[in-house]
Amino acid sequence: MKTKNLLLSGALFAGLLMFNACDDSPTVDTPAEPTVDTDITEQQIAIDDVVESVFDELDATLSTDYEMGSTTELKSAGEQVGCPTVIVDRPEDAKYPKTVTFDYGTENCEDKHGRLKRGKIIVTKTGPHWQAGSERTVVFEDFFVNDNSVEGSRKYKNEGLNEDENWEFSVNIDVTVETTEEISWTKKADKIRTLIAGGDTKGYPWDDQFLITGTSSGTSSMGYSVAREITTPILRKRDCRFAVSGIIEIVKTKDGEAKTTWLDYGDGTCDYKAVVTDEEGNTKEIMLGKRFKKK
């Protein structure tokens, strides 16, 4: 019996040696999927959303030129009711210049796209929205969007009709946003907004569509500086919260090291998706509206 066991053990050992000899190929590690750093890009999208929320509310009222009284309290234009209260002050003997105050109160109030706002936006207008050369200047008073505070100013000017008979508006932005993540961002921008649809329904601004071109820059309390250029015009539909197409080149710099990514908003579909591409050609789809949410 002992001899038989020894023979079986020897056979098994020889078999293992033969198996290992036949399977001596080196082990190959599967390379990890390349990662695309989208953190700063997502922060920039969130800052844009805060700023665009101001456009939505103001344009919805001011583009209709409803505010005719000398000192008048109005409901907001469009489909939103009761938020904000709009107060108009102007000289007794003239329609302009006038000051329009959007007062959201001290409690958060939800806008058309689900953003929560409180505080005041104060607008000074030199003339009607649809008059070439008219300007408006916007400042903020204890103003918050989704609990992110906004300070600074925004200037908006009607540049008249372009060669395609579309209205153009120049925009200059200089704001600081203190976010719910305790990150501070400054943002400066010079852009042109061209109205390509909706201009024939001036009493209903929510069908407006704009092509936006231009540049912007910013710095953060995290030590980043960012330069952005719209390389393919951005298409914004006012009834959609985020841009639906267009490409932005984003150059972020920290400690002297610069990296470039490209943000692509897609094919025109109104959704919450965009694609970020890095310098190596790696891509990542992101969901918009994930950063700087309300507390």
Image: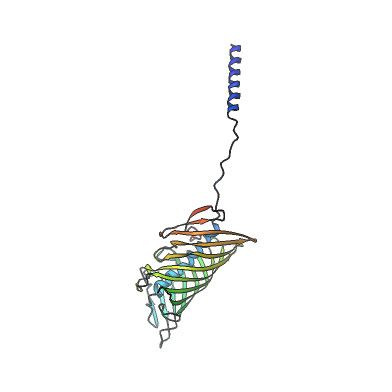
The residue closer to the viewer here, 66 or 259, is: 259
Q: Is residue 93 left or right of residue 278?
A: left
Residue that extends furthest to the bottom in the rendered view of this protein: 93
Q: Residue at x 59, y 18 (%)?
A: 11
Q: Quick check: can you spot residue 63?
A: yes
- Picture coordinates of residue 175, whole percent (x, y): 53, 70
* Rendering quarter of residue 30: top right
Residue that extends furthest to the front in the rendered view of this protein: 163
Residue that extends furthest to the right in the rendered view of this protein: 256
The residue closer to the viewer here, 61 or 272, is: 272
- Picture coordinates of residue 254, whole percent (x, y): 62, 61
Q: Quick check: can you spot residue 186?
A: no
- Picture coordinates of residue 79, whole percent (x, y): 35, 68
Q: Residue at x 43, y 79 (%)?
A: 132
Q: What is the image's colouring? A: rainbow
Q: Residue at x 58, y 16 (%)?
A: 8
Q: Is residue 255 left or right of residue 240?
A: right
The residue closer to the viewer here, 53 or 149, is: 53
- Picture coordinates of residue 192, whole percent (x, y): 48, 71
Tell how many labels.
Answer: 0
User: The N terminus appears in which quarter of the rendering?
Assistant: top right
**As drawn, 196 above or below 129:** above
